Image: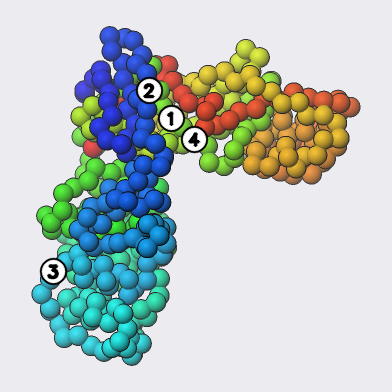
Amino acid sequence: MSNLNRWKSKCAAFMAVGITAGTVAPLVAPAPSFAQTNGFYDVSSNYWAAPFIQELAQRGVIAGFPDGSFRPDQPVTRSEFAAMIRKAFNKAQERQAINFVDVSSNYWAYSAIQEAYSTGFLSGYPGQVFRPTQNIPREQVLVSLANGLDYVASGNVQSTLGYYSDSSNISDYARSPIAAATEKQMVVNYPNIKFLSPKGTATRADVAAYIHQALVSTKSATAINSPYIVSTTPIVANVTIPEGTVLPVKYDKAEKIMVTKDETAPLTLTISQNVITDNGDLVIPAGSSVVGELKPAEGGSQFVAQKLITTNGKEYNISATSGIITKTETIKKGTSTKGIIKNTALGAGAAAAVAAVTGDRAVATEEVLGGAAIGAITGIFFNKKSVDLIVIQPDTDLEMTIGESFEVSYR
């Protein structure tokens, strides 16, 4: 077990905090959200696939668009993937190229498709059809890379694929190659490392990550430390997260949260940046969940964390709290609810108060924190002309401080 006496920022993609001699050190300012990777304005330095994209862009395997964007979430077609394969790998021909009926000799990716076929990375469909403009599924990308690199699963295929929570969705033809790709640590799953989404369309970010890992497997590229790379290697180390550590969190479901001063509301937040040790070891990945409650506290509301669930499914009981939020907004009789509930998450009590005071019973049908049925408590606020609700801005109000040190495992 190693003691986390000192934390520091190792690179712009990571967040780090630290303590010295029992004194809480300030949060090290993370890289600004507009920090870019390799000149792509839409790939920030803390984007999950940024290091993979940067590496392949430097190699000339992938490129951006004329407007300076990379468009990481854009789907990849089979012809685009063939072009990336051609640039990434230098492999000898192992079979004779064929002429696909839907790929003319003057098609922009004709040569790349011919080469991807002849080197064993890609095949066509019955009737010598290639479908060059078809968006390529994630399982096809992994099968292509495993087959093209001649990888064969060495362990039990079913056992290896059992790692994935959605393994039953993997096509029969893809099971053995994906098991081989998994053994070679070529699979990168974001945001849930155990969710493969085999039939989901592969994005440009996905393909960049897969190809990079394939290059690593052939010792043609340097390994990247990412929490989203699938590995069946057991966890090998522990580290203590010390009391006083500040964890940055976010809440993506709403721009603000409203609760009454007296209610307790369940809430799950997300770790917004990677947390690393001073040695660069990643111990709490961005995207991990923090489960807890908003509770009354000294005339306001406070988030009290109960559990940390990392992206690889590990759970830890934690003691951590936000500051106490006391800012309020007065809801008056006759107020339009449109402006109140827009981009807002409501506690059950807050929803009941808004419904009763404004007379807009439709609020009672809105989704509230915890999914509570609020009809039964609306009567508490009946005949009230106004009510004061606590207003919480998640991005600034819910940053958490660890109240009691705890130990996490990592590999």
Tell me, yes or no, whether the two marked residues, 3 and 4, touch with CB atoms within 8 Å. Answer: no
Residue drawn at x 52%, y 37% as measured from the top left:
251
Crowd class of label 4 (few under 14; some 14 to 19; many from 20; radius 10 Å): many
Give whichever of discs 3 and 2 has the lower sequence position: 2
Question: Contact (CB < 8 A) between labels 2 and 1?
Answer: yes
Residue 250: assigned label? 4
Disc number for residue 90: 3
The first of marks 1 and 3 along the sequence is: 3
Residue 155 appears in view = no
Describe the element under mark 3 as helix, strand or loop.
Answer: loop
| Pointer 1 with pointer 3, Cβ within 8 A | no
Identify the amino acid type marked 3: Asn
Q: Is residue 17 positioned above or below 212 on the image?
A: above
Q: CA distance from mark 3 to mark 4?
A: 43 Å
From this view, report whether residue 229 is shown above or below residue 7.
below
Give the mark nearer the N terminus: 2 vs 4. Answer: 2
